[in-house]
Amino acid sequence: MTAIELVQGDITRESVDAIVNAANSSLLGGGGVDGAIHRRGGPAILEDCRRLRAAHLGKGLPTGRAVATTAGELDARWVVHTVGPVFSATEDRSGILASCYRESLRVAGELGARTVAFPAISTGVYGWPMDDGARIAVETVRAADTTVEEVRFVLFDERAYEAFAAQLR
Ligand code: AR6
């Protein structure tokens, strides 16, 4: 069974096998956790992303999918980039958000990662309500069939941490 840990802080400071990035389809960087990962990980991550775009991801990475690159100067072996859905009040996109967690674990597991750090995907710029984002994250990881031994949710602020802690209680 996969152990679930919670940490409050900056995901770019974590030491794990794989750090998951809440990216966008372009894979070419952005704000939030994406910006922080590229800033701290250095240009090697963007170089890898550009290579993926030039190879088999010409149209970008679809939402709900995941792909791995080097972690550059981060204390990890890989960054797993996934693209969360933008929250919609009229369309249920929770299956896509669950897919981000599942696909990221699949990609990380195939690489041999045993420890994986996740941010709260889609809960920033993409507007997903934190409580519901936390529920989907925890339920999906709990149900996942994965070789990853530890999942660490790294929550940026206390509100996010409390939302995830409530799901684990
Ligand atoms: N460590 C951990 N969590 C963080 C960090 C950090 N350093 N920085 C922000 N968060 P967001 P999204 C939290 O907006 O909603 C980017 O521009 C943040 O408080 O980073 O999936 C991409 O390029 C929030 O709870 O990602 C896309 O265009 C969570 O991480 C778009 O934003 C996710 O917030 C993706 O939007």
Image (tube, rainbow, N blue to C red):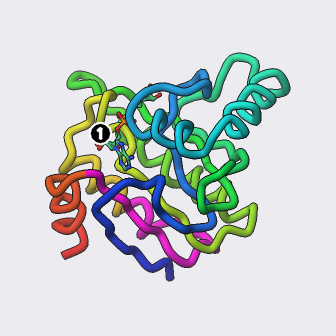
Residue drawn 36% across and 26% down?
86
Query: What residue is at 16 percent from the left and 57 percent from the top?
Result: 158
Residue 96 lies left or right of residue 164; in this view the side is right
Q: State the quadrant of the C terminus.
A: bottom left
Does 117 sit left or right of 55 as displayed? left
Q: Quadrant of residue 75?
A: bottom right
Which residue is rendered at x = 40% and y = 74% of the image?
A: 4
Residue bearing mark 1: 123
Q: Is residue 61 magenta?
A: no
State the image coordinates of residue 101 (x, y, percent, origin top left): 48, 52
Decide: is 6 above or below 19.
below
Determine which quarter of the picture holds residue 111. Answer: bottom right
Which residue is drawn at the image coordinates 22% and 48% (left, top)?
Answer: 132
Q: How many neighbours does mark 1 have within 10 angstroms: few (below 14), some (14-19), or many (20 or more)?
A: many
Residue stretch in magenta: 140-156
**How many numbered marks have been drawn onto this rendered protein structure?**
1
Is 145 within the magenta? yes
Q: Please tell me whether residue 110 is drawn above or below residue 129 in the rendered image.
A: below
Q: Position of residue 63 (x, y in %)?
A: 52, 31
Estimate the x, y position of residue 37 in percent, counting from the top left: 52, 43
Quadrant containing ligand 1 reads top left
Residue 85, x across and y down, in percent = 41, 31
- The residue carrying mark 1 has its beta carbon less than 8 Å from ligand 1: yes
| Furthest residue in direction top, as rendered | 59
Relative depth, front residue between 33 and 26: 33
Provide the secondary structure element on which disc 1 rests: loop
Say which of 70 and 162 sits in front: 70
Kind of residue at disc 1: Thr
- In this view, the residue in front, 46 or 142, is 46
